[in-house]
Image (spheres, rainbow, N blue to C red):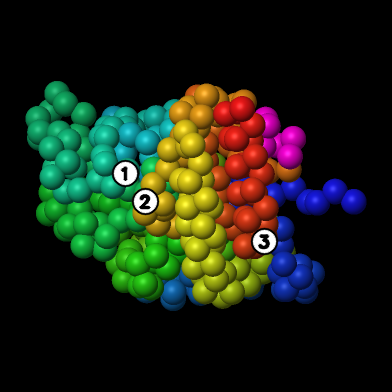
């Protein structure tokens, strides 16, 4: 019998645990558009409590959560400052422009981590014939920079500076629990100065679907009708919210395992001829590495790896991304590393 595939494409590929499936089957439900789904209400309240906020709002996806947050805090014709490789700019179907009517003001930053000096330099002057800056959106961890983490003091300085200039600050915290684990802090301390926070249940925490927005009660009440307008008004959504509650309670404590497995994979890859990766740069559960020095492009490399039972995704022609998660243990990562070594050494021959 062949060994199972090691799927490192993303931490979104995890399957619900038996505990999640039981909670889903037994969930108390109601019509959430009428605010009557008790399980959704518990999830929203628990998320707000964990983040030290007044309220939370369940959304079907992180992309919707980001868009709802932008729509609630900007108006058409304004600008949102974001990092050039950020998810909200590159992977959300240009929704901030197509739907919210705002323009991304893009800044490149080392390792995806903006600082106040860069942000301040991108704020538009207050003149009537220029689009005005309304918001700063940052991503923590930063996906396409390899899961890099904002130091708390850097994020706080951006929030303080932006607020002093009358701007809102949104956090795309899809993997904010990974960031908190890497920093050894809780998510409340890491996110306390942001006006709005979106985080995913369906990545490192392992739920099958869903994200949340947390913030002030006023913000959430502005977000709710926008969610409905975008098609995110759900009915007996407690069936999926129940899995989210389990993920929220059981997922954060084990993320350090994923981080250790990612570092292990990076260390093995770093020892291969022609593979470019710095294990010290792997802060969380994402490993991005360059295979061009081994005479391969990313597509060729991944095709060879897939034939042997390992999945990843291309970042560009030369770089590959692999993500560790709950459904991949150390033995799986060791097997994946051995297969990737085989692919590289075969190319060298």
Q: Which mark's residue is nearer the viewer, 1 or 2? A: 2
304 drawn magenta: yes
From the image, tell me which residue sits under label 1.
111
Count residues near mark 1 (Cα–Cα under 10 Å), then give few for <14, some for 14-19, many for 20+: some
Q: How many neighbours does mark 3 have within 10 angstroms: few (below 14), some (14-19), or many (20 or more)?
A: few
Q: Residue at x 73, y 39 (%)?
A: 308
Please identify the quarter of the rendering in which residue 99 is found: top left
Q: Is residue 224 above or below residue 183?
A: above
Q: Read off the magenta span.
A: 302-308
Tag 1–tag 2 contact (CB < 8 Å): yes
Task: Give the residue pinned by disc 2.
Answer: 281
In the image shown, does 181 or 63 lie closer to the viewer?
A: 181
Tell me which residue sits at (39%, 43%) in the image: 145
Residue situated in front as seen by the camera: 143 or 338: 338
How much space separates mark 3 and mark 2, taking CA atoms? 23 Å
Secondary structure, mark 3, is helix
The residue to which callout 3 is attached is 331
Instruction: Determine the residue located farthest toward the right in the rendered image.
Output: 1
What's the distance in space between the residues labelled 1 and 3, CA to CA? Answer: 30 Å
Q: Residue 318: x percent and y percent?
A: 48, 28
Residue 316 visible here: no
Q: Residues within 10 Å of mark 2 (few under 14, many from 20)?
A: some
Query: x and y percent of residue 344 in the render?
Result: 58, 35
First along the sequence among labels 3 and 2: 2
Q: Quadrant of residue 152?
A: bottom left
């Amino acid at each position: 019998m062949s060994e199972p595939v090691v799927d490192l494409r993303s931490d979104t590929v995890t399957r619900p645990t038996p505990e999640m499936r039981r909670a889903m089957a037994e969930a108390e439900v109601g019509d959430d558009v009428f605010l009557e789904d008790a399980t959704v209400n518990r999830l929203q309240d628990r998320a707000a409590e964990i983040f030290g906020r007044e309220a939370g709002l369940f959304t079907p996806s992180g992309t919707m959560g980001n868009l709802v947050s932008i729509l609630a805090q900007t108006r058409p014709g304004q600008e949102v400052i974001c990092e050039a490789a950020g998810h909200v700019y590159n992977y959300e179907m240009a929704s901030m422009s197509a739907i919210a009517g705002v323009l991304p003001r893009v800044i490149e930053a080392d390792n995806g981590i903006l600082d106040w000096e860069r942000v301040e330099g991108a704020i538009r002057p207050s003149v009537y014939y220029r689009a005005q800056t309304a918001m700063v959106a940052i991503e923590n961890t930063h996906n396409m920079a390899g899961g890099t983490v904002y130091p708390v003091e850097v994020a706080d300085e951006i929030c303080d500076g932006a607020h002093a200039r009358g701007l809102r600050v949104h956090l795309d915290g899809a993997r904010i629990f990974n960031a908190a684990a890497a920093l050894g802090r809780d998510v409340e301390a890491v996110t306390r100065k942001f006006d709005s926070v979106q985080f995913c249940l369906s990545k490192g925490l392992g739920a099958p679907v869903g994200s949340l927005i947390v913030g002030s009660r006023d913000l959430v009440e502005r977000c709710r009708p926008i969610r409905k307008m975008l098609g995110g008004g759900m009915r007996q959504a407690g069936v999926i919210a129940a899995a989210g509650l389990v993920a929220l309670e059981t997922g954060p404590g084990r993320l350090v395992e994923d981080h250790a497995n990612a570092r292990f994979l990076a260390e093995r890859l770093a020892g291969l001829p022609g593979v470019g990766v710095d294990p010290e740069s792997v802060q969380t559960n994402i490993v991005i590495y360059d295979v061009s020095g081994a005479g391969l492009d990313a597509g060729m490399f991944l095709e060879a790896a897939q034939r042997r039972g390992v999945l990843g995704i291309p970042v560009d022609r030369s770089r590959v991304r692999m993500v560790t998660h709950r459904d991949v243990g150390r033995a799986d990562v060791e097997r994946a590393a051995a297969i990737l070594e085989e692919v590289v050494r075969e190319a060298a021959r």
